[in-house]
Structure formats: structure tokens, C-alpha cells
Amino acid sequence: MRKTALVKMTGDLADMRPDVLLWLRLLAQEYFVVICTGGGTQITAALNERRIPFEFGALGRQIATFEGRQIARDILERNQAEIQDRLAIEKISATVIVPVLDVGSVLCHVNGDIFVLTTYLGYDKIYVLTLESRKAAKQADFAKYPKIEVLGFPDTQKE
């Protein structure tokens, strides 16, 4: 039976830089890979631009309006489509999902880090891909979970 890996990828890496693509290509050779895309930076910018209120609570961003939640979902789905397209071009086998649950026909956004924990018992390995500047904080967040490995990629891509 093939091993399974969940990859939670910050939306800041959704442009599928060469270093991320190389890492995913190698991972997909050994694991069945599912990628959960984020989009926090993009969501915050879009909500601020439209002056839609939100706040951060214990479980992540809480968006006050349906319009705001729909904007967040649209951003996540756009990231999902762009990642899927790029993986197809690169011939890297992976399934791409967004952290939005449909619970009894109610859309429930799930903070990406919380989503990682909800999958913990199912996957053989879980990777959190983030920017190098956020790596230490993420490592502290997940320190008591041995199956989770946090990887930091440079904040700016070198050309």
C-alpha cells in the first residue's frame, strides 16, 4: 500500500515556484499526495480592499459576512485551480483541495493549521509549507505532533 502525505501549502507559495515544484515532484514519487492550499495573505488583502470586517480568533480568521466568506472561498478555489493546472503541466501527481467544509449545506471555512490537525490521524506524513520567516512559529505550533514537518521556503524567490 502506498504511503499518504498531506501538504498544507501557504497561499504565498501557490504560484508554484521551481523550488516548490521540485520538492513536490520528489514527494509524489514516494507518496500519494494531497495538497491543501491556503490563501490567507490574499484573503486579508481582498477583505481589506472591500472593507469587509473580520477578526482573528482562536480558530483563525472569522469573517462577519456571507459576502466575505464567499470572497475567501473564491480565492482558495482560484489557488486550487492554478496549482492543479501547473501540476498537470509538470506531470506531478497530486490532488488539490481547499480547507472549506460543507457541513449540512453550511460552508465552514477551516484555518489551514486547524485543517492539518483534523487530518492528523489519517495521513502517514503531513508537511506544512510556509515562508522561511514563518517557519519557527509554525514549528512551535506543531511541536507536539511528530508526523508534522514544517518546511520553510525563501520569502523571496531568487531568479
Image (cartoon, rainbow, N blue to C red):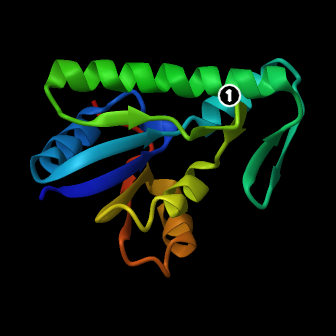
Q: Position of residue 33 (x, y in %)?
A: 26, 46
Q: Nearer the viewer, residue 79 or 135?
A: 79
User: In the displayed structure, would residue 8 be above or below residue 136?
Assistant: above
Specify the amino acid type for callout 1: Ala
Tell me: 63 left or right of 140: right
Q: Residues within 10 Å of mark 1 (few under 14, many from 20)?
A: many
> How many numbered marks appear?
1
Quarter of the figure that contains the N terminus: bottom left
Q: Residue at x 47, y 62 (%)?
A: 135
Q: Quadrant of residue 62?
A: top right
Tell me: 137 left or right of 58: left
Q: Nearer the viewer, residue 152 or 127?
A: 127
- The residue indicated by pointer 1 is 72
Q: Position of residue 57 (x, y in %)?
A: 81, 56
Q: Nearer the viewer, residue 1 or 157?
A: 1
User: In the displayed structure, would residue 52 be above or below residue 2?
Assistant: above
Quarter of the figure that contains the C terminus: top left
Q: Residue at x 73, y 57 (%)?
A: 59
Q: Residue at x 75, y 28 (%)?
A: 69
User: In the displayed structure, would residue 107 be above or below residue 150?
Assistant: above
Tell me: 66 left or right of 43: right
Q: Quadrant of residue 100?
A: top right
Q: Residue at x 55, y 28 (%)?
A: 76
Q: Secondary structure at mark 1?
A: helix
The residue most toward the front is: 104
The residue most toward the bottom is: 144
Q: Position of residue 21 (x, y in %)?
A: 23, 36
